[in-house]
């Protein structure tokens, strides 16, 4: 079950900035709901494939616009390396 919208809003106030919405084990309908939640909450979407050891397939496909948004966020973080926020 998805996290209630109020909980997502609370987590966003604490620094949540993205949701892993694309994952091979998730059904397409669940992925769509997560991506909609991300869109409504102005959150980035990332993808995961659970690569833990050799012999597994690597990589995962995601829409180019979502990848570019995620990549740009990573590059922005790298540009401000050393500036950390604490949740206290």
Image (cartoon, rainbow, N blue to C red):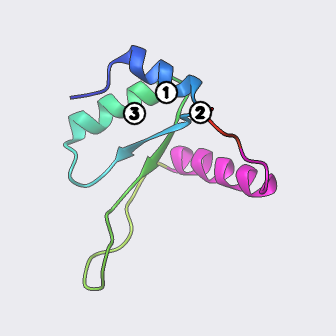
Q: Which mark is residue 3?
A: none
**Image x and y of residue 67, in percent:** 54, 51
Q: Nearer the viewer, mark 1 or mark 3?
A: 1
Q: In the rendered structure, are the residues bearing label 2 and label 1 in contact, judged by CB atoms less than 8 Å apart?
A: yes
Image-based side of 54 in relation to 17, left or right: left
Which is nearer the eye, 61 or 16?
Answer: 16
Q: Which residue is rendered at x = 39% and y = 68% of the image?
A: 59
Magenta range is 64-84
Q: Quadrant of the N terminus?
A: top left
Q: Which mark is residue 11?
A: 1
Dominant SS of magenta comes to helix
**Image x and y of residue 47, in percent:** 41, 52
For the view shown, which residue lies furthest in the bottom direction?
Answer: 54
Q: In the rendered structure, are the residues bearing label 1 and label 3 in contact, judged by CB atoms less than 8 Å apart?
A: no
The residue under label 2 is: 15
Image-based side of 63 in relation to 88, left or right: left
* Callout 2: SS: loop
């Amino acid at each position: 079950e998805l996290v209630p919208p109020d909980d997502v809003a609370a987590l966003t106030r604490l620094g949540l900035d993205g949701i892993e919405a694309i994952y091979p084990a998730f059904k397409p309908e669940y992925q769509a709901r997560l991506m909609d939640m991300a869109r409504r909450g102005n959150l980035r979407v990332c993808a995961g494939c659970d690569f833990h050891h050799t012999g597994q397939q690597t990589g995962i496909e995601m829409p180019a616009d979502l990848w570019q948004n995620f990549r740009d966020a990573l590059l922005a973080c790298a540009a401000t390396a050393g500036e950390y926020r604490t949740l206290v």
